[in-house]
Image: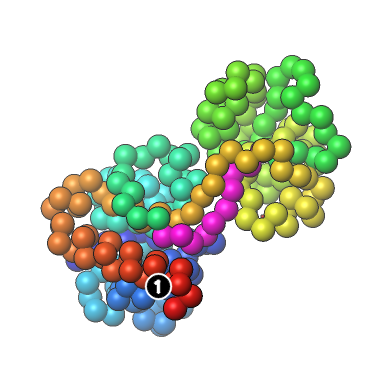
Amino acid sequence: MLTIAIAKGRLQQDALELLARAGVRASREALASRRLAVEDEGGRCRFVFVKPADVPVYVEHGIADCGVVGRDVLLESGADVLQPLDLKIAYCRIAVAAREDAGIGRAGVLHVATKYPRIAARHFGSRGVPVEIIELSGSVELAPVTGLADCIVDLVETGRTLAENGLVVVETITESTARFVVNRASYQLKAAAVGEIIRALGRAVEERGKGA
Ligand code: PRP
């Protein structure tokens, strides 16, 4: 049996729909429950639902053979997992944003609030911009509004949270979609099952892209 770790939250529903198209489906009742580990109807897979940042941890350690998680999270985690498939769902950008009236980067150390300290440090580091990274766990947009930071590095999906808090994108760092990731050992040891699900998911992604 394959264990698949699914990131809870924004990509969960689309990920489960893609997996269902690929023939791996948990019952409605199991999904409606508060159980964090559920089997698919065919008894081939077990889903575990975890916080996005924990998906690479479960997969790298081999507790889950596979996982579905955003590229943003993978970039931040740096986990050593295989990424054989872009699921083309949960599109978003990782961007630098600031108050509309802020002139960031004029002088001194830039204070950057973020849930993505590694991505932020790499981005500004590569430009030689001195920064102090202020790590937050949520509601990051509040930081420039309250004066905690000059700017933020955060995920932008619709742009609504930025707009409603008077912030604008200064620069897009990178784009992100959900990825199907695989543990290195599982890729070899469970090659048949892993290969089958990658192929089925690949077809499901294509069908979805054609609007089927
Ligand atoms: C994310 C992100 C932004 C928001 C962007 O937060 O950190 O706040 O979504 O989405 P939008 O561009 O569609 O408005 P999330 O909902 O994960 O909650 P959090 O602030 O608690 O991290």
User: Where residue 203 sits in the image (x, y, percent)?
Assistant: 33, 69
Task: Estimate how packed mark 1 is, as few (under 14), some (14 to 19) or many (20 or more) residues with alpha carbons within 10 Å.
Answer: few
Q: Is residue 84 on the magenta stretch?
A: no
* Furthest residue toward front: 210
Give x and y (percent) for residue 84.
31, 52
Could one spot residue 7 in this view of the protein?
Answer: no
Up-down: is 174 above or below 7?
above
Amino acid type at circle 1 is Glu
Residue 88 is one of the magenta-drawn residues: yes
Q: Is residue 156 visible?
A: yes
In the rendered image, which residue does mark 1 sit on?
A: 207
Q: Position of residue 176 (x, y in %)?
A: 51, 49
Q: Residue sitting at 30 percent across and 46 percent down? A: 82
Determine whether, in the image, residue 204 is placed left or right of residue 145. Answer: left
Quarter of the picture holding the C terminus: bottom left
95 and 139: which is toward the camera: 95
Res 104 → quadrant: top right
Q: Residue at x 43, y 44 (%)?
A: 74
Residue visible at 22% across and 75% down? 43
Q: In which quarter of the view is residue 210 placed?
A: bottom left
Q: What SS does tag 1 mark?
A: helix
Which of the colour schemes (rainbow, by chain, secondary structure, one colour) is used?
Answer: rainbow
The picture places residue 14, in percent across and down from the top left corner, at 47, 68
Picture quadrant of residue 192: bottom left
Q: Is residue 156 above or below residue 134?
A: below
Residue closest to the eye, 7 or 209: 209
Q: Which residues are magenta?
A: 87-96
- Left or right: residue 98 compared with residue 87: right
